[in-house]
Image (spheres, rainbow, N blue to C red):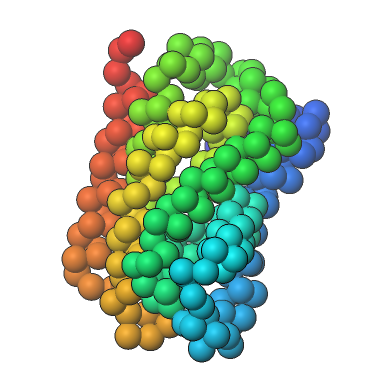
Amino acid sequence: MTKKGSIFKDFRQAARINPYVASAMLWVTFMPSIGSLVLVPWTISRADWLMQLNFHNPITISGALLVSILLMGLALMPTTMLAGLSGFFLGWTVFPWLVLGYTLATVLGYAWGKKVGGDSLPLILARYPKAENLIRKKQGQLGELIFFVRISPVIPFALSNLLFALMRSGYWKLVVFGTLGMLPRTTLVFVSGTLASSIYGAIRQGEGISNYVIFIFLLLLSIWGIWRFFTKKN
């Protein structure tokens, strides 16, 4: 209880020094769910219009890409939900644009997190020098951590953007390893969307036994990879 309390105490102290990081943490934690409550009904009400969009038109592509970047990069909607709905309404034509969208959203999310986060991580870890020292020593290997965090089906996209901004992972590593890590779960959800018989099936992102098996596999793989990153010697 004491240890848990001290962690929250350190976080509150860092938040007092930099209140923006506490606000940002709350935003990326709750805003995607709130955004979904607003955007999903809007999507359902405009289902016919969405299914008629022409993705061979450069203006349509540019507009949809910009919207997806803002939704994902500013944590206004979960990436998995956007992937499932895109698969249901638009099909494989938009898949490359979806990948490009979350790649550019990574840049936006990282830039935003870096600006609001400042140097908050050392403040939060001030009483945990071993953890701070471990992160510093493994700074050059963060690509591995990024990949396994991104491949996890339970770690939110926006939250990981903020955490890696606090850790100063760098744009290049986050874009390259983050994009590769996102591909498996994005593809899984997108395929579920294309196969869904209704928009509600796309929102639920598939409930077949194969989806659960892949979900568990990705979860275990990410846990193993993150554990290996922090426990292996340099």
Position in image of residue 92 (x %, y %)? 34, 67
Q: Quadrant of residue 98?
A: bottom left
Relative to 64, 154 lies left or right: left
Position in image of residue 79 (x %, y %)? 48, 58
Q: Quadrant of residue 209?
A: bottom left
Position in image of residue 154 (x %, y %)? 41, 52
Identify the residue shown where x is 42% and y is 65%. 94
The answer to whether 104 is drawn above or below residue 89 in the figure is above
Identify the residue shown where x is 19% and y is 66%. 210
Badge count: 0
Identify the residue shown where x is 41% and y is 42%. 179
Relative to 75, 19 lies left or right: right
Q: Which quadrant is home to the C terminus?
A: top left
Q: Nearer the viewer, residue 106 or 211?
A: 106
User: Given the current orientation, which residue lies at the most extreme front position?
Assistant: 57
Q: Which quadrant is home to the N terminus?
A: top right
Q: Nearer the viewer, residue 215 or 46?
A: 46
Position in image of residue 29 (x %, y %)? 60, 52
Relative to 173, 218 lies left or right: left
Looking at the image, can residue 195 be seen?
A: yes
The answer to whether 138 is drawn above or below residue 106 in the figure is above
Identify the residue shown where x is 51% and y is 88%. 48
Looking at the image, can residue 152 be seen?
A: no
